[in-house]
Amino acid sequence: MRLLNGFVVLLFVSGIFLSCTINSNENKLNNTVNHKSYSGIPDMEFDTLFHDFGDIIEGEKVAVTFRFKNTGDSELLILDAFSTCGCTVPNYNKEPILPGKEGKIEILFDSHNRAGLQNKAITLKINTPLGEKTLWIKANVKSNYN
């Protein structure tokens, strides 16, 4: 009797696992059917790679939006965006940019304790053949003490 009960429990547990696997495979199939596949290479083209804020007062926070287009024939991904200085912060959408579509990256520059001429590079890690793109900002930060 104990052997029969063990066999029934084993059948029950196996049935649960089998049904989960079937549902999982159906979901994968649905995701594959609904997702358009692109074969090709993405490319990223900006209106400009440089922005000059001109003269600003020390302590000011200024922002610029760089606009770009995916001129390739596959989804464009921005994998990472960073600056070597904590005073410069990029903000971007993490979703793929489809071929022919446009995107934007906002760069915020905080001039607190940054008097003088400031040149900052923002590096984008992207899924293009070159693998990265660099944006530049410049500001002449006027000290509060002058």
Image (cartoon, helix red, strand yellow):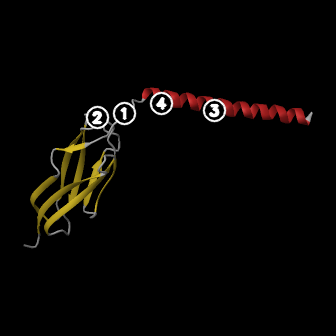
Mark before the other along the chain sequence, 4 or 1: 4
Name the residue: 31% across, 38% down.
97
> Considering depth in this image, is 72 or 101 the residue closer to the camera?
72
Q: Amino acid at mark 1?
A: Tyr
Earlier in the chain: of badge 2 and badge 3, it is 3
Q: Position of residue 99 (x, y in %)?
A: 28, 34
- Residue 72 drawn above or below residue 80: above
The dot on residue 31 is 4
Q: Residue 131 in the image: x percent, y percent? A: 31, 51
Q: Which mark is residue 38?
A: 1
- N-terminal of the pair, mark 4 or mark 3, is 3
- Location of mark 2 (residue): 99
Secondary structure type for disc 1: loop
Tag 2 and tag 1, C-beta contact below 8 Å: yes
**Cα–Cα gap, marks 4 and 3:** 17 Å
Which is more N-terminal, label 3 or label 1?
3
Q: Quadrant of residue 44?
A: top left
Horizontally, is 41 left or right of 116 in the view? right
Q: Given this view, does label 2 or label 4 mark the residue nearer the observer?
A: 2
Q: Nearer the viewer, mark 4 or mark 3?
A: 4
| Residue at the spot of label 3 | 20
